[in-house]
Amino acid sequence: MRATVMYRAGEVRIETVPDARIIEPTDAVVAVSRACICGSDLWPYRGMEEIPDSGRRMGHEAIGFVEAVGNDVRTMKAGDLVIMPFAYSDGSCTFCHEGLQTSCVQGGFFGIAGMNGAQAEALRVPLADGTLFVLAVGQDDALMPSLLTLSDVMGTGHHAAVTAKVGPGKKVAIVGDGAVGLCGVIAAKRLGAEQIIILGRHADRIALAKEFGATNIVSERGDEAVERVRQLTGGYGVHSVLECVGLEQSMLTAISIARPGGAVGRVGVPQDETMPGSQPAFYNNVTVGGGPAPVRAYIQELLPDILEGRIEPGKVFDRVVGLDDVPDGYRAMDQRESIKVMVEP
Amino acid sequence: MRATVMYRAGEVRIETVPDARIIEPTDAVVAVSRACICGSDLWPYRGMEEIPDSGRRMGHEAIGFVEAVGNDVRTMKAGDLVIMPFAYSDGSCTFCHEGLQTSCVQGGFFGIAGMNGAQAEALRVPLADGTLFVLAVGQDDALMPSLLTLSDVMGTGHHAAVTAKVGPGKKVAIVGDGAVGLCGVIAAKRLGAEQIIILGRHADRIALAKEFGATNIVSERGDEAVERVRQLTGGYGVHSVLECVGLEQSMLTAISIARPGGAVGRVGVPQDETMPGSQPAFYNNVTVGGGPAPVRAYIQELLPDILEGRIEPGKVFDRVVGLDDVPDGYRAMDQRESIKVMVEP
């Protein structure tokens, strides 16, 4: 079968690799219908050190059909349509029971060194019962992009909103206008936010943010952005900030635009070991939460809104490629030609 | 009148200063019955740059009697016994209404440069109606130490517990065995924690922690402390960490001993601009909250437990000095001869 392999920063190849197969009795093999390239894939694309022989199999978001299951798999069968969250999880440990599947004691992540990736024709999914979400619907091409976002970006935007304590009547800001930030706009609106400010400056993304429910656009950066958000919020800042970037500057901005007693939900993978703004966060009693989103826990809640057309997060996909064009998809996202690339293997 | 003035690190003097008097119509003058030296006073004691002429009036915790009120003060009269929280606040702004008086738009802090201090015979209290809590009880010498802790340390320990999401059945750890950490033990027990682990190594403090309800003592530091807490908690760490120190190492320990999905409530004044452990906090979805405690908001909740003898936070005072011996009180706390010093002017 063919799969996407990254060997070092900037070097992404489509290669023929051994077919995905059942290894453990709890495994399933999923034939990938749609996968995508994630903003977080751009971090290794920009800075990964060489992994000379094996490379790194890429991709952690997928929707597809079960092709085979191990002997211990109970909740699905070949032919079922499933959403594959970006983390695998056993569904039975204390953290899975608490809805924090990204901390599953037996779990892990797809698309990291040594693990399978979803930008491929198929992949082996460990702990299939705990990991995969079986959809009762058949394939529906119009719905597939939005359903695919439940494997990561929509659940991640929702996690940012939940950990930022978004609720009815709240003033909300979103730092980052990538696919996750845009899904954060959807999540904030869905949870009842009164004001939704997005910090971003790319015309196409801003247009989509407005369509999703953003009420204000702040295209300034740094101190000017902070000042502008304060102006828009009666001088105090917002109750909830969704940090969807992961850089030092974006985190500092996020903390600086939170009102006293507010909360930052961060889902941008932090690129630094230390967090800036420790003192302003402290003096303003600003809470910082978030992390890898337990998207598996959120599918049940978000799915009806997609099936019934109330939200359309699939609109974040503005380019579709086959496997052969995945390397160009990386390039397009890296150069911000594309918000998010969908892959049809 | 006499008051405590710090001129630079290590230099604390008791001096005769102009009598406290009403300046604004919303002021009250309070004759101090009991004040104290705070762990946070040790930061300037150890590192303050010289303020050559005026120095800095010290002290932000007091209980005392109203001596005079301005024309606009409505809720108290001369002779009332009052608790003075470490921050003054108007009681009417949006943040006061939300119970975050430490972010009052007109508010500020006692005992900082340019403001009055409580380690004195008396002091002017701005915004008296919003700031002071009038006690219905008369002076009761046995209760005074515990009531005094409502001006800071007991409310601060409670804030750490609240922001660390302590609740029934939770496993809790407290980093720091100072007066605030010890009050954190009281708060954790009061809120129903099942296991209360204190990280500390001073025999007198540990004994008091046990009396207050600590179930485990961890005297190791750094990685060994993390390992020990994990052993005590089935390998995962605690749900709630009360960070009561404010140093980089203590914060890193706090984040490292939180279980996935757990929360750190920090009340130790952070001494560094950046926060360590950004990545482990992120990957484990550990929330970091806390800040200056809105103790004014907590008095109503904590007071009955003190009046009815269910909690005795006043036991953190292990030394009582008159004003003349305040400089020696600083020395004793700095050298850890004393947990917390009470001042009787």
Image (spheres, coloured by chain):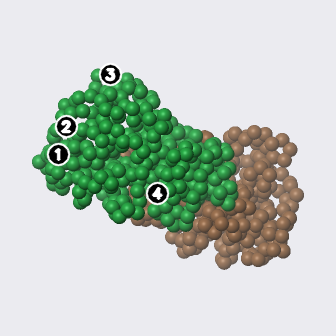
Chain colours: A green, B brown
The residue sitting at the top extreme is A52
Expressed as whole percent of the image width and height from the top left, the position of residue B303 reads 58, 71
**Measured Cα–Cα span from mark 4 to mark 3:** 41 Å
Which quarter of the figure has residue B11? top right
Q: Circle 4 is placed at which residue position?
A: A186
Q: Circle 1 is placed at which residue position?
A: A67
**Measured Cα–Cα span from mark 1 to mark 3:** 31 Å
Q: Circle 2 is placed at which residue position?
A: A20
Q: Determine the residue positioned at 76% across, 77% down.
A: B74
The residue sitting at the left extreme is A71
Asked if both marks, 1 and 2, belong to the same chain, the answer given is yes
Front one among A286 and A75? A75
**Measured Cα–Cα span from mark 4 to mark 2:** 35 Å
Labels 1 and 2 touching (C-beta < 8 A): yes
Expressed as whole percent of the image width and height from the top left, the position of residue A334 reads 46, 34
Expressed as whole percent of the image width and height from the top left, the position of residue B85 reads 67, 63
**Measured Cα–Cα span from mark 1 to mark 4:** 33 Å
Marker disc for residue A52: 3
Left or right: A125 in relation to B293: left
Closer mark to the observer between disc 4 and disc 2: 4
